[in-house]
């Protein structure tokens, strides 16, 4: 069971936009599907255990971590698990018949495309969702036109993103065991590990590690390490740690270095982030 509060919402030609706050009474373990394509930008830190798989696909029972921006294809059954207890998100839903023309005529949801939907590592899409959420919460002049245009742009960017992913099944990626080794190491305190250290943990060469990791997670290992580090910054700040304490814990050279890295990654300062999530 969970409480759902719709903070703001708007409809447009291809679907609808909602800014939602959810709070769960217990850990999440659900299986289901949606009739619409749905992309979500999680503005509060996700639990590091948040992950999903596709139980109806024989090669896709391994749970993969959700990113900050993730996508649920219409009518695809997803099994999701998370220890998250609260969430603040921008959710953009698209009616399939309204956006199917944006995809290639022979488009199919291959394994590679389905896996990539769990973590859309695309700064442009993230920025557009953030902008859309701001517009829905604080509408300005001709807001309905702006919402229509930005929503359509998000849909087109998503179509380009998925059309650009190869049609072949995912092969040659890292084993679940090695992916766990990497995630466990990234949970430790101090500066992030080097590629040489991670390659040693997995018993691979750096070249093999970087190639196989990208095949598994659909992003570079460097981008993944940076993203996970910022995720940990969010978690520690939200739990009440000071910027100085977080910088020390995660191996930043100074609080200023942490603030600079956080702003480059998210577009806002740590104190602005805290003000937003606590409001």
Image (cartoon, rainbow, N blue to C red):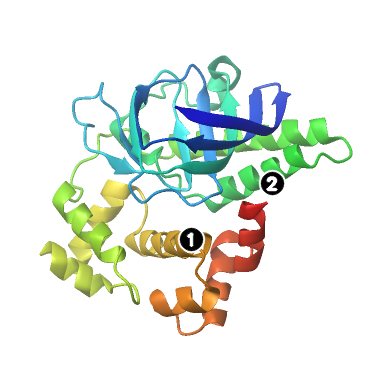
Q: Residue furthest left?
A: 203
Q: Which disc number belongs to residue 188?
A: none
Residue 222: image quadrant is bottom left
The x and y percentages for residue 13 are 70, 21
Within 10 Å of disc 2 (Cα), the crowding (few <14, some 14-19, many 20+) is some
Q: At numbered mark 1, what does the secondary structure look like: helix, strand or loop?
A: loop
Tag 1 residue: 239
Q: Are marks 2 and 1 in contact (CB under 8 Å)?
A: no
Residue located at (65% from left, 25% from top): 16
Q: Which disc number belongs to residue 131?
A: 2
Q: Is residue 260 left or right of residue 204?
A: right
Q: Nearer the viewer, mark 2 or mark 1?
A: 1
Asked if one can make out residue 31 in the rendered structure from this viewpoint, the answer is yes
Mark with earlier residue (2, 1) = 2
Residue located at (59% from left, 67% from top): 270
Q: Residue furthest bottom?
A: 253
Asked if one can make out residue 205 in the rendered structure from this viewpoint, the answer is no
The x and y percentages for residue 175 are 15, 49
Instruction: Note whether 231 is above or below 100 in the view shown.
Output: below
For the residue pair 266 and 45, the one nearer the viewer reads as: 45
The x and y percentages for residue 276 are 66, 55
Q: Quadrant of the N terminus?
A: top left
Residue 83: image quadrant is top left
Residue located at (52% from left, 42% from top): 87
Q: CA distance from mark 2 to mark 1?
A: 26 Å
Residue located at (51% from left, 25% from top): 37
């Amino acid at each position: 069971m969970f409480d759902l509060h719709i903070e703001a919402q708007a409809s447009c030609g291809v679907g609808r936009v909602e800014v939602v706050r959810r709070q769960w009474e217990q850990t999440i373990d659900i299986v289901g599907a949606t009739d619409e394509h749905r992309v979500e930008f999680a503005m509060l830190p996700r639990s590091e255990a948040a992950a999903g798989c596709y139980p109806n696909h024989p090669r896709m029972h391994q749970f993969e971590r959700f990113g900050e921006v993730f996508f649920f294809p219409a009518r695809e059954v997803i099994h999701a698990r998370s220890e998250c207890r609260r969430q603040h998100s921008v959710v953009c839903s698209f009616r399939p018949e309204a956006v199917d023309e944006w995809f290639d005529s022979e488009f199919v949801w291959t394994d590679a495309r389905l896996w990539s939907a769990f973590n859309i590592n695309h700064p442009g899409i993230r920025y557009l969702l953030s902008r859309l959420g701001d517009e829905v919460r604080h509408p300005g002049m001709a807001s309905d036109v702006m919402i229509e245009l930005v929503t359509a742009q998000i849909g087109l960017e998503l179509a380009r993103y998925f059309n650009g992913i190869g049609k072949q099944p995912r092969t040659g990626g890292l084993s679940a065991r090695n992916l766990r080794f990497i995630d466990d190491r990234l949970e430790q305190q101090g500066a992030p590990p080097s590629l040489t250290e991670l390659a040693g943990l997995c018993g691979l060469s750096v070249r093999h590690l970087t190639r196989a990791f990208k095949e598994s997670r659909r992003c570079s290992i460097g981008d993944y390490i940076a993203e996970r580090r910022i995720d940990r910054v969010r978690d520690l700040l939200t739990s009440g740690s000071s910027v100085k304490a977080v910088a020390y814990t995660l191996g930043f050279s100074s609080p200023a270095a942490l603030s600079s890295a956080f702003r480059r990654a998210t577009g806002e300062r740590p104190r602005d982030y805290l003000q937003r999530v606590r409001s």
